[in-house]
Amino acid sequence: MVLPAYVAALDNKQQRETALITGASSGIGLDLARLMAPNFDLIITARNESELEKLAGELESQHRTHVHVIPADLARPEAPKIIFDEIGRRGLVVDLLVNNAGFGAYGNFAESELQRDLDIIAVNISSLTALTRLALPGMLERRRGKIMNVASTAGFQPGPLMSVYYATKAYVIMFSEGIANELKGTGVTVTCLCPGPTVTRFAERANMEESRLFKLGAMTSMDVARAGYKGMMAEKGLVIPGMMNKTLAFSVRFSPRKLVTAISRKLQERTKGLSRTANPKK
């Protein structure tokens, strides 16, 4: 990957900025950490401390980088503040924020576990919002910074059988576009990454690979991470990796909503029966 002027300028100053990546223990977050490690120091967080420590060792041995591990469960309302308190205690600042952590569950909403649904909202919406709010003052003071929020093409339409998850991703898209407008001219940019079907533990543990949507084709998490990283560094507002995903995302704008919802359900249905196993938080 050719380094954009943003990173080249930092290299010329012989300094490394620090990126906070949530959900870094697997999937897209893990691959983003690997992509960013050559150019940035990292703060990585997720629930799985052992996986984070393993990743930190890998990246520090391969690159001239510092990797700080702060395990946290973003379903807990106090987690974002605890993370930033620890960042401050270590004398670090967040120059780039990657809100990647998220999860969902499959099944009819009326039969779902209420606490699980509330945890989905907490991780996908509440923690993302809080972390962004906590990171922004420092970025604005320094007049530079980058935020990438990982949403999904799911956020462009309703999602029967994953209604809460789809709704949370719609929030992430609207929130990202709204604050991006507010931050114009400040030196801080916001990128919203909207992957389509992606081969990750997320999909595997929720058995989403059996859905018709996945049968249309899925991208690797590294391909998605690479597109997101490139888009963030180029200061793009919206990144939708893959031509099929772009087509599906934008076609819903010109279709009747009931038809969009019906098609969304058909694509979401599995070819091998219904399971309601939730994928774990990253």
Image (spheres, grey):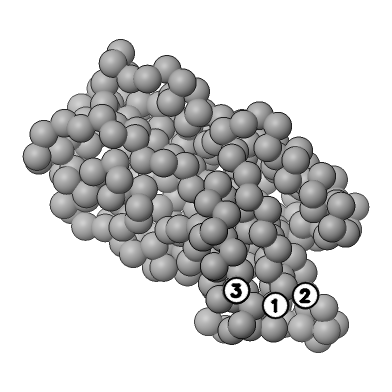
Residue nearest the observer in this picture, 206 or 225: 206
Toward the viewer: 197 or 40? 40
Task: Give the residue number, with chain letter if any, for mark 3.
Answer: 57
Label 2 SS: loop
Q: What is the total number of numbered labels drawn onto the structure image?
A: 3
Q: Are marks 1 and 2 in contact (CB under 8 Å)?
A: yes
Note whether 93 is above or below 11 in the view shown. above
- Give the left or right position of residue 167, taking residue 106 as reference: right
Instruction: Kindly report the distance in space between the C-alpha atoms of the residues bearing marks 3 and 1.
Output: 10 Å
Where 37 sits versus 121, above or below?
Answer: below
For discs 1 and 2, the disc positioned in front in the rendered view: 1
Residue 172 occupies which quadrant of the picture?
A: top right
**Residue 32 at x, y = what percent?**
53, 65
- Residue 223 percent location from the top left of the image: 39, 68
Q: Which residue is mark 2?
A: 16
Residue denoted by label 1:
65
Q: CA distance from mark 1 to mark 2?
A: 8 Å
The disc labelled 1 sits on which kind of residue?
Thr
